Image: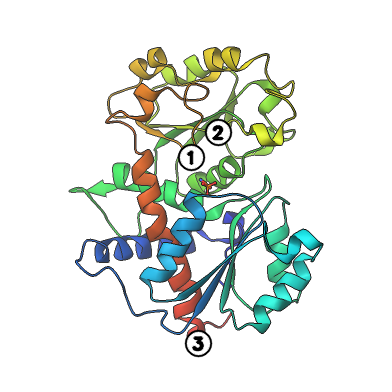
Amino acid sequence: MSHLISIRDLTREEAITILDTAEQMAATQNRGIKKLPTLQGKTVVNLFFEDSTRTRISFETAAKRLSADVINFQARGSSVSKGESLKDTALTLQAMGADAVVVRHSSSGAAHRLAHAGWMNLPVLNAGDGTHQHPTQALLDAMTLRRHYATEGGTPHAGTGLDGARVVIVGDILHSRVARSNVDLLTMLGARVTLVAPPTLLPIGVEAWECETSYDFDDAIASRPDAVMMLRVQRERMSGAGGGFFPSPGAYHFEYGLTPERFARLDPHAVVMHPGPMNRGLEICAEAADSDQSVIVEQVGNGVCIRMAALYLLLASEGQRND
Ligand code: CP
């Protein structure tokens, strides 16, 4: 592994290595001193062309916990607003001595271009590109699920996947890099995934994905899933309130929201997930988001460990890599 661009670039063994390494990182985070010396002297650049709270802060935290120096680059306020290209930004970062680049961009394929265009020779970690992929989000979601379903005595044991776990992913699949990454990863790990959305929010060609699809959230709940992952309605990628994708926010909530009534029908063992940021009252009600079955805060915490694992695997063993 020389970059982390897409779940599709990973083998099952590589994905499980990242998850197992993240568990080892998690074990170090209960100590009084959380910092490890592993990436001392390395510089990680966070290159964010789109807004982010969780991903940017957790990549920064992860790099700092591994003792790397971190440079945060926000497109807003940089020379990108004067027209500087992705290529010239990349050349500038390489010239300044960066050792790895974490990139979020609104264009699908931007992370791949940065990694493979030959502009720079650094590991690239995709922090979300357009509607394409968000690999560390899927990995932190898998870590969270594995902690609930692939455990023995409460501890995930090395090498396990998610065999047999049933996961329902609900909402704005069309615009969701989280859904795409999760379908790829969760099915690779042995889970069964069902996507639930109105027909307008399912992408063309979804029938070729390795999952089931449904327009009926109540049916999906009746199938007694182990986890329900609610997706954010990405209104910034639609024009207007619903952009013609649904009649009104109220109608969307009624048909596709995790309402108090639907939440009450979930099995007590089922966990409620959301990648954040949440639109409370639209795709998810407060009762579900704040319940004991919610693992939304756990997902954020696991994100730091997954990103520590990814940075460690890409940077700490750089000299030993042969790919
Ligand atoms: N889940 C996620 O990517 O959140 P942010 O946009 O806050 O990074």
Q: Which residue is mark 1?
A: 276
Q: Residue at x 57, y 28 (%)?
A: 171
Q: Which residue is mark 2?
A: 232
Give the mark nearest the N terminus, 2 or 1.
2
Label number found at residue 319: 3
For label 1, the SS is loop
Q: The disc labelled 2 sits on which kind of residue?
A: Arg
Q: Nearer the viewer, residue 167 or 311?
A: 311
Q: Residues within 10 Å of mark 1 (few under 14, many from 20)?
A: some
Q: Is residue 25 shown above or below 145?
A: below
Q: The disc labelled 1 sits on which kind of residue?
A: Gly
Q: Which x, y percent locates residue 252?
A: 59, 17
Q: The disc labelled 3 sits on which kind of residue?
A: Gly
Residue farthest bottom in this picture:
319
Q: Residues within 10 Å of mark 3 (few under 14, many from 20)?
A: few
For label 3, the SS is helix
